[in-house]
Image (spheres, coloured by chain):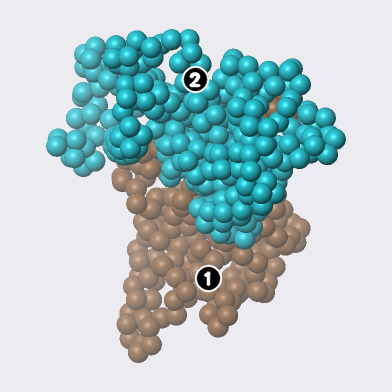
Chain colours: A brown, B cyan
Amino acid sequence: MSEEVLRTEHVSKSFGQVTALRDASIRLARGEVLGLLGDNGAGKSTLLKILTGFHQPSRGKIYFEGKEVQLKSVSHARALGIEPVYQDLALINELNVYRNMFLQREIMYGGPLQILNDGAMRERAKEQLKQMRVNIPSVDVEISKLSGGQRQAIAVARSVYANAKVLLLDEPLAAMGLKESTMILDLVRHLKEKGDVSIIIVAHNYAQIFDFCDRINLLQNGQITFDQRTENTSVEELTSLVVQEYRAARASVKPPASK
Amino acid sequence: MPGDKVDSLPPQPQLARRSERPSLARRVGLFLLRSREASIAIAAILLIIYFWSTAPAFLSIGNIANLAEYAATTAIIAAGEVMVIICAEVDLSAGMVYALAPFVMFFAHQAGVPFVPAILLGLMVAAMVGLINGFITVVLQIPSFITTLGTLFLINGFTLTISNGYPVQPKGTPLVTDLFGGNPISQISWAIGVTLALQFVLVKTRWGLYTIATGGNLVGAAEVGIKVGLIKVGNFILCSTLGGLAGILDAFRISSIDPLAGGTDIMFMAIASSVIGGTLLTGGSGTIIGAFLGAAVLGILKNGFTLSGVSAFTFDMILGAAILITMIINVRLSQLRAAGRVE
């Protein structure tokens, strides 16, 4: 559990005059589930986008598996094993489940025509989803026919199948009902039990994900203000921290720095 | 209309309905709704029966050949348009390339190039136009409607300039003429060949998969690493080349190359065929076989009404109505599909 996979040191990001992220240092151990919490505009998506290689930090360093790395692009980060699952999921509605799962990693018959081996992709997709205990009617249905939770599960399964070492889940429970949230959280718990993938869950609703995290980091106004193992804190403590933040924001004449 | 409430229905009643055994009529209805090709094929058969009953000459060998030639040209261009439209783009210039490519071939041949390389040269120039369309659309980020509207006029002017506005007569060797549209069987064979080949590419190859992904979710496809620009440019090249091929085939068939032939008329016919065949202009979904059948239906309508003595003016009204009705049905269908009623 203690082997480190990903670490940032004093990472900051400014967009012109606005500092979106200030001196953020996080660390992630192998198999660990880290909850990255914070209000809208606290800097969660900025930090996430730095980890996916989408943004480059203005200052600070990133270490992956002990070595300093400069994540030049999304595909670079992905090649290292850092797989983002975006809120928009990057699924193609018009394609069926297994073709989505193998998008960009298609199994093909040899030859210049690049003919798709649908049979092999169908079987492996079935197998992978079964292993991950993802329940969908069939791998042959179009993605557009699935529920939000099922789509999210497919996107996660796709990243795991890509040999993700670090999985970045951006608001995986946003706009999802209770039943669907349960399905996603079951999936996260299952991945955690297997223990070969580390997960960062970005969320603003901490009560929902609290039990599934090993550690909680709280981002406020672009800074990590809180870092505790889950057993040493509670939903109540987080609530009181957030309430304090709101009170401080209301007390100050100037509205809190956002974005 | 009861269908209007579909979107807001909770999922439970649908589950209940699905467990009942649907009636035969409902199952046939569902099959037609699911398979766009089936419904357009049935429309074609009904039209054939109708015109055959009103004008028996409709099914004479001569007329069938006539019909096949007309539909074949449109179908070849439509096949390319479908690929571009699935990318959520459109190519308005294909009809002008139809006129340009045979002139390139003709002048190359006059300059001493044998016919087959001359044909290839014509196709290469057509492909170049597609490359330019794709480059302006993808790299310079001009909407393809505007890009190809520009190249439409450009190419038309260019063709008129190099031809001085006069038609020319290509005199191919008998074999070349027979292979490239001169023989009545040849052109429809090309159309069927192109249709089947591209349908295969669309549903069974990586190129087709990426084409659908590009048009279905441009941002998502780029996020997973698909080179969406390359896919678009490739399909523009394909569409333009097929426009050139159709023009060359017609040149040998009619043994005349007219700088005013094709143009916007054949381009709109090709796009209409695609749409009637079930390709959505919003991208992400389409069928080449559907476009072939769409071209057949348009051909049957035009030919049938001509035989029955209906004027060209009336035909345009019917064509317009056919496009509108098909589009309305298509949109309703995709709403129903989204609501989970039609699987």
Q: In front here: A88 or B42?
A: B42
Q: Quadrant of the N terminus of chain B?
A: top left
Across and down, in percent, residue A167 comes to 57, 48
Disc 2 crowd rating (10 Å Cα; few below 14, some 14-19, many 20+) is some
Across and down, in percent, residue B12 comes to 21, 32
Q: How far apart are the two marked residues, 2 and 1, measured between alpha carbons?
A: 76 Å
Across and down, in percent, residue B18 comes to 25, 22
Q: Is residue A249 left or right of residue A227?
A: left
Q: Secondary structure at mark 2?
A: helix
Q: In front here: B95 or A61?
A: B95
Considering only vertical position in the picture, is A116 above or below B153?
A: above
Q: Is residue B229 left or right of residue B92?
A: right
Q: Quadrant of residue A4?
A: bottom right
Q: Amino acid at mark 1?
A: Ile
Residue at left offset 39%, top offset 41%: A149
Q: Which mark is residue B167?
A: none
Task: Identify the chain of the residue marked 1, using the numbered disc in the image.
Answer: A
Q: Is residue B139 left or right of residue B109?
A: left
Disc count in the image?
Answer: 2
Provide the residue designation for mark 1: A224
Q: Amino acid at mark 2?
A: Asn
Provide the residue designation for mark 2: B66
Considering only vertical position in the picture, is B102 above or below B41?
A: below
Residue at left offset 47%, top offset 41%: B265
Task: Identify the chain of the residue marked 2, using the numbered disc in the image.
Answer: B
Residue at left offset 50%, top offset 69%: A43
